[in-house]
Amino acid sequence: MILTVLHKTRYDFATPVGGIIQSLRLTPARCEGQKVLDWRVEVPGAVMGELFRDGAGDYIQTASLRSVTDHVEVTVSGTIETQDTAGVLRGHRERVPPRAYLRHTPRTAPNRAIRELCEAALADLAGAGDLDRAHALASAVHKALPYTPGATHAHTTAAEAMNEGAGVCQDHAQVLIACAHLAGLPARYVSGYLNATEDGSPHEASHAWAEIFIGGLGWVGFDASNETCPNEHYIRLGSGVDAQDAAPIRGLVLGGAEETLDVTVVIEAQQQ
Amino acid sequence: MAETYFNEMYDANGLRAPYRGLEGWYQDMPTEFRAFKQAEAEELFRRFGITFAVYGEGGDPDRLIPFDMFPRVFAADEWRRLERGIKQRARALNAFLSDVYDRGEIIRAGRIPADLVYRNEAYEIAVSGFRPPLGIYSHIVGIDLVRTGADQFYVLEDNCRTPSGVSYMLENREVMMRMFPHLFQENRVAPVDNYARLLKRTMASVAPAKCDRDPNIVILTPGHFNSAYYEHSFLADLMGVELVEGQDLFVEGDFCWMRTTEGPKKVDVIYRRIDDAFLDPLCFRPDSALGVPGLMNVYRSGGVTICSAPGAGVADDKAIYTFVPEMVRFYLGEAPILENVPTWQCARPDELKYVQENLSDLVVKEVHGSGGYGMLVGPKADKATIETFAAKLAENPSNYIAQPTLALSTCPTFVEEGIAPRHVDLRPYCLVGRDVELVPGGLTRVALTEGSLVVNSSQGGGVKDTWVIAEE
């Protein structure tokens, strides 16, 4: 499938600011099932650092501006050819040992509700393989947290989302990571894009899911929001231990002023 | 007190050789003169501004740590062995760090449990797979040692991040030389004052490959409210480098820059005295105002060297400590010269059981604790204290390790009544760059309270000048 992406993030400032610096994780991962045909990350007026690959295999780049009068816009535009790998991450060069992803962060720390969810999901699976257990956890998270935009916010933790009983893809991913850790499975957060319409029409498409390490298979994606594994409709950008760590854009405004953020992501499947 | 402790000045045969040059000095010293000298020493320390707490113990930053004028002395041959042991350990710790952020051979070989390393809070995923210049992570290794006999030394702990206290080593010597110049004419005391030069050379040797000139080195401090700020500014002065705070630096493109009146100046090596978590709000704690946003990207793309390397803390965790002798054997193929203190991991049920049954004989410490806080010194604790501690231990065993109470050596120390033996430890500072170097000396801490084995300044400890008698 050939997908085109246009992702714009615009920051507007009420008064001029002393500068902006951002760490951008906006270039698709190099792995089986993803072939970049054309990809651009642009921040007009910014000094861009070289694109480097970190130990987790993510492409990262720094963008900075010394002063900004009223706005900054980060534009990602590109075309990528994708294939279904049944969620399995293959051909991805990374050097972080999977077991390093067994540690939770404040955002993925389990609470009692998550422990109970995990236990219930695995109750009938004694002796089952890790892949089956991971699927069971993803389904349980899907059922426990009905997709409800607005129920949670950017800083909501897995425990808070569980208490809320609702969430969006970020919450699903973080709760699933917490569950996987409880089950002894390394797990991490993945940021990316999702083409979610059958007819290929453009729509809002920022997405996130979890990857769980399965012995014998390696890292496998689990999208608890849609109760599926990532397929050719997914574009994988990069990963981290939680939503904050894997954020496509981590930035800081120096001499902070009031800021309004506007994000639009449009993804489109090309007619073949 | 029964003389069961090794006295570094007098043993069964009388005066030990390294202390020969001091015998007449203190015996002939009139009481008034001593009081006068002690006051002079305090005045000098106040003037130098050394009033900070050692080893991040917190406490009153303006409090003066007591200085004891009686030097602690090592003979040349004693020091030679210590030096070999310290350098060996510093090399092994760096080899371990370089390995666990790369292929993890020691874990694959089953010599260290994977979870102890990879699930350790100090293991930084952000630098996994990244190799810093020369593969060195800990450029200044502070190794805390105690002595229990003529030839018996034990390592209490390793400090691979940013060990503090070296300014005391330098100032204690400076003060002693000013007050008692004749002692240094009569005794061949090996100098320590080239430490700053060696430190600078060490840092220059790990400049990034992209640096094609004399590297610009800076010391990054959290600021003047930090208890070790004096040391940061003292070292910057001695090294002839800039002392900066996070806000003095910025990232642009592939490099880190320092704001100066003549415009931005590229920075090549950062000797940071702030913790990993605060280094870069775009990589670690987003609320950190102490660090430099974007720094980790520059670091990981080879634009700047950070000393110690982010992630170095995984080597000095108290749970990892047990395995350092194994690291020496595994990476260097050598027998460890310095011994570890036997340590029980309370995380292991059988070892916990032993600890619980022998609390009154053991020292029990928190795995991540420091500064002598939150620990139980069994032989010195009353029944109630032991019971309270036992409850805490049972609640979270994996948070604790236990060690036997060591018979720390004593060194003569000036006390109210004259001279008396007091227990001491030692922290030497080993530098690791292209070369591994150690100045002959270190920081000796002394427990000033009679019978006390706790040398921490927060609990009545003081410091001494540490001499190594130069080779004939």
Image (cartoon, rainbow, N blue to C red):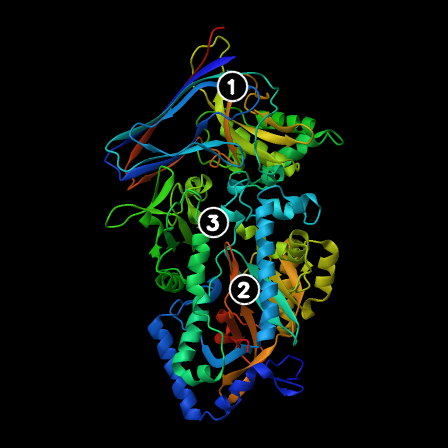
Circle 1 sits on which residue? A35
Residue at the spot x=38%, y=53% of the render?
B217
Disc nearer the start of the sequence (2/3) = 3
Instruction: Identify the chain of the residue marked 3, using the numbered disc in the image.
Output: B
Looking at the rendered structure, which numbered label has been put on residue A137?
Answer: none
Q: Check chain identity for marks 2 and 3: say if they share one.
A: yes
The amino acid beneath tag 1 is Lys
Badge nearest the viewer, 2 or 1: 1
Question: Of the residues shown, which amino acid type is indicated by label 2?
Answer: Tyr
Name the residue: 48% across, 22% down: A193
Measured along the vertical axis of the image, is residue B55 above or below residue B249? below
Q: Which quarter of the rendering shows the C terminus of chain B? A: bottom right
Residue marked by disc 3: B276
- Seen from the viewer's position, the closer of residues A31 and A236 is A31
How far apart are the two marked residues, 2 and 3, measured between alpha carbons? Answer: 22 Å
Q: Who's the residue at 50% across and 45% down the image?
A: B132
Q: Is residue A153 visible?
A: no
Q: CA distance from mark 1 to mark 3?
A: 36 Å
Label 2 in the same subunit as label 1: no
Residue A164 in picture, x, y percent from top left: 51, 32
Determine which of the numbered discs, if any, sits on residue B373 in the image: 2
Left/right of residue A15 with respect to residue B405 in the rendered view: left
Estimate how packed mark 1 is, as few (under 14), some (14 to 19) or many (20 or more) residues with alpha carbons within 10 Å: some
